[in-house]
């Protein structure tokens, strides 16, 4: 996604996104209905003509390296693969069947307009090297989009903020209101949604929290570069789509939000 490469990528996406947006008026109010015992698990198989690959960010934390299994790998790879199935089923975007994972210091991130990371408050918070900070800043300023998911409570926020504020120390993290375009770009959603983990489905999430908020870092034109999904766990909604103990309404909310964020990243 060095600037010329980014626009070549978007030319490849133009047709699919255009078709999706033409369907907006008829689909925006439709609940996705992903989950169900009789629901087909789609064989994606679109690698040769794909337009989107789901990329998860692999990172280090203060109490553990990012290789192997750590906070970055929670819900992996089931959540990633199920989200790709949802994108394939609910939009006209052709997806790669296998998700990928990259670190911020890998220049391959510039080939992907949408990155996902989660659990940024665990293990003392994330650790970013100078190269990762520089590469991530450049990626975001050139039009990239980072979705941060699944961290809970003030302590985990403080852990996250202590490290991530190094990327854009001069930019404020703002709270997004329900009328922001990102909640209405494809599905019409009433703002942030609290999506709990498996077996925490009594209207509460981690630490007894019963509400979510979305925060963002904006570029100079007001585009959301970083979307911070605090006190909510979309990853569990994707991972447990077919689990009989996970309520359909939470899985559906996870797909609706995720697809909105993806559509926003592709069109802004």
Image (tube, grey):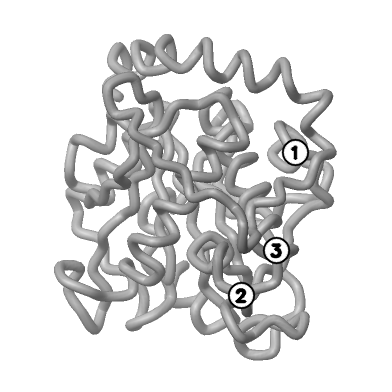
Alpha carbon separation for disc pair 3 and 1? 18 Å
Q: Is residue 259 left or right of residue 176?
A: left
Q: Residue at x 34, y 45 (%)?
A: 55
Viewer-proximal residue among 223 and 102: 102
**Quadrant hosting residue 249:** bottom right
Residue beneath disc 3 = 213
Residue beneath disc 2 = 244
Q: Residue at x 28, y 31 (%)?
A: 110
Q: Is residue 123 above or below residue 180?
A: below
Q: Residue at x 24, y 84 (%)?
A: 63
Of pointers 1 and 2, the one earlier in the residue sequence: 1
Q: Quadrant of the N terminus?
A: top left
Of pointers 3 and 1, the one earlier in the residue sequence: 1
Indicate which label's residue lies in the foreground, 2 or 3.
Answer: 2
Q: Position of residue 154 (x, y in %)?
A: 58, 81
Q: Position of residue 39 (x, y in %)?
A: 60, 53
Q: Position of residue 158 (x, y in %)?
A: 50, 76
Indicate which label's residue lies in the foreground, 3 or 1.
Answer: 1
Q: Is residue 240 above or below residue 49?
A: below
Viewer-proximal residue among 258 and 121: 258
Q: Secondary structure at mark 1?
A: loop
Indicate which label's residue lies in the foreground, 1 or 2.
Answer: 2
Residue beneath disc 1 = 187
């Amino acid at each position: 996604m060095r600037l010329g490469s980014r626009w070549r990528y978007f030319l490849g996406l133009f047709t699919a996104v255009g078709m999706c947006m033409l369907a907006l008026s008829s689909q925006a109010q439709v609940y996705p209905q992903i989950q169900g015992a009789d629901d087909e698990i789609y064989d994606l198989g679109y690698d040769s003509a794909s337009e989107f690959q789901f990329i998860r960010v692999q990172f280090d934390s203060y109490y553990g390296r990012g290789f192997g299994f750590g906070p970055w790998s929670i819900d992996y790879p089931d959540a990633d693969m199920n989200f790709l199935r949802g994108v394939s089923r609910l939009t006209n975007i052709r997806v790669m069947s296998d998700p990928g994972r990259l670190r911020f210091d890998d220049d391959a991130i510039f080939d992907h307009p949408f990155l996902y990371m989660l659990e940024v408050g665990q293990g003392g918070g994330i650790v970013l090297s100078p190269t990762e900070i520089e590469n991530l800043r450049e990626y975001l300023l050139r039009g990239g989009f980072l979705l941060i998911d699944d961290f809970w409570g003030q302590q985990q926020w403080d852990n996250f903020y202590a490290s991530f504020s190094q990327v854009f120390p001069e930019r404020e993290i703002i709270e997004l209101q329900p009328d922001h375009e990102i909640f209405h770009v494809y599905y019409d959603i009433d703002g942030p949604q609290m999506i709990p983990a498996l077996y925490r489905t009594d209207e509460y999430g981690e630490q007894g929290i019963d509400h979510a908020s979305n925060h963002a870092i904006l570029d100079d034109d007001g585009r959301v570069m970083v979307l911070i999904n605090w006190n909510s766990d979309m990853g569990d909604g994707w991972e447990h789509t077919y689990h009989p103990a996970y309520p359909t309404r939470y899985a559906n909310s996870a797909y609706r939000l995720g697809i909105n964020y993806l559509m926003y990243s592709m069109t802004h």
